[in-house]
Amino acid sequence: MTQGSKPRLLVVSSVLPFPRTAGQQVRVYNTLLALRPVFAITFLTVCDQGEAACAQHEMAPLVDRLIALPSITHRHTVARAWHKLGGAFYSVVTGLRPSNYILGQVELSPARVAAHCGGPYDLILYEYWHAFESAPAFRRNGVPCVLDMHDVLWRAYDAQLGNASSPWINPLRERRVRAYRRREQAAWTAFDALIAISEGEAEYVRTVLPNMRIFVAPMGTDLGRWRYCWSPTKPPRVAFYGGLDGSLNRQSVQWCVTRILPLVWRSVPDAQFWIVGANPPPEIVALGEDPRIHITGFVADAASVLATARVVLCPWRGGYGFRSRLVEVMAVGVPVVATPDAVYGMGLRPGHGLLIAEQDEGLAEHCRTLLEHYEVAQKHSACARRQVEERFSLDATYGHLAQELGAFIGKRDVK
């Protein structure tokens, strides 16, 4: 790095930050937005045939240079079939997921990254750990490598596999989770520092790697995009918010409908349940046969729909990840009722726009209170927005990360 110039950053990512309909896309977008004033950014990624021109256009405001490698696994029908088979075989042998093969062994393999990344660089930032095997080559040349974990992925993998009733299947399932956990935690050691999405996940990493440098960058929210606009309608609405293409959100919706809402409807029979999220599968769509239940599908302006709800309900099992949708909801001013797992490690204060309960009855009671007492809901609405302003603005999250990464390089330069 020459004196007076920006440090040079290479971002290695299979996630393109558009169209920003998924949480991982939003995180990459906001990260780049915050890093751009501090770093000269090169972004290395993979694109399907015909997508490179679109990627160049979308990425122009965010990076100085885009390297869009043509996809190997999606070149043609035969390649898709071959690599799908290869991913399945790799998964069986290693206990990892097919995506580890597709990204780490093929699309962003160490040889391919080395051949196309250009350089030199002052810092390498990896989005997800799948391509970790290319990091040691940079580190041998004195270039520090940082991993944005996005999540402790083995925990998400554990939850997605679920619990099998068969005594024959459960040991296999547990073996696969253990194998994935070992490989993920071993991959962390390939980096000079990690970025966790919550204090809870940072604490977990410290139990595994007590000497690892850890930055904490929660999923911040654009408060200009998610303005305070709470305007609940009558009859009162309880809402669920989240993409419905994932099994965990679908399970949460079913939990709301079968276990919590029946308790709410005993006291507030006219309450409606609005399921706000893209890609509802047939079993979720079928819930709309009940006239009290409304399924929106994808909505371009989710904030305006959420603003009509008296409360958003989020039952969740598994203390991992970061429910960024809850931050968006609270930014709009909608009070949230959730399980402790749903907000684990996020640093949110219960009782300030957020009401916590472990069991169905407690969750239902919180909902009933907010539905029956507008003044109470109004107080929590203001508190919800205030929490987000204090803790989850873009400056407080991604902006703070950009400053920390800049200082991290500076300290290494001094040494």
Image: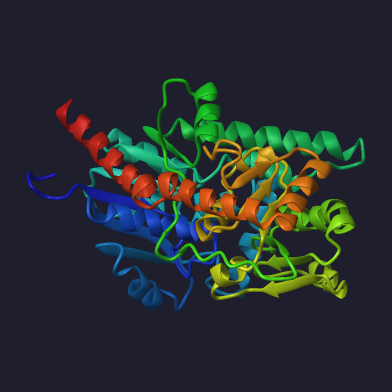
Please state which of residues 59 and 350 is positioned toward the viewer in this rendering.
350
Q: Residue 284's x, y, as percent? A: 80, 67
Asked where in the image residue 182 lies, by quadrant, the reply is top right
- From the viewer's perspective, is residue 392 above or below residue 77? above
- From the viewer's perspective, is residue 221 above or below residue 279? above
Q: Is residue 381 visible?
A: yes
Please state which of residues 83 and 275 is positioned toward the viewer in this rendering.
275
Q: Residue 188's x, y, as percent? A: 48, 34
User: What quarter of the picture does the C terminus occupy?
Assistant: top left
Please state which of residues 101 and 278 is positioned toward the viewer in this rendering.
278
Task: Name the residue at 37% across, 72% down.
Answer: 58
Q: Residue 205's x, y, as percent? A: 52, 29
Task: Name the residue at 75% across, 70% down.
Answer: 235
Asked where in the image residue 346 lies, by quadrant, the reply is top right
Q: Is residue 116 visible?
A: no
Q: Residue furthest left?
A: 3
Task: Name the residue at 46% across, 44% down.
Answer: 218
Q: Residue 253's x, y, as percent? A: 77, 58
Judge from the rendering whether residue 100 lies leftward or rightward of residue 149; answer left or right.
right
Judge from the rendering whether residue 123 lies leftward or rightward of residue 352; answer left or right.
left
Task: Name the residue at 24% across, 36% down.
Answer: 407
Q: How are the residues colored? A: rainbow
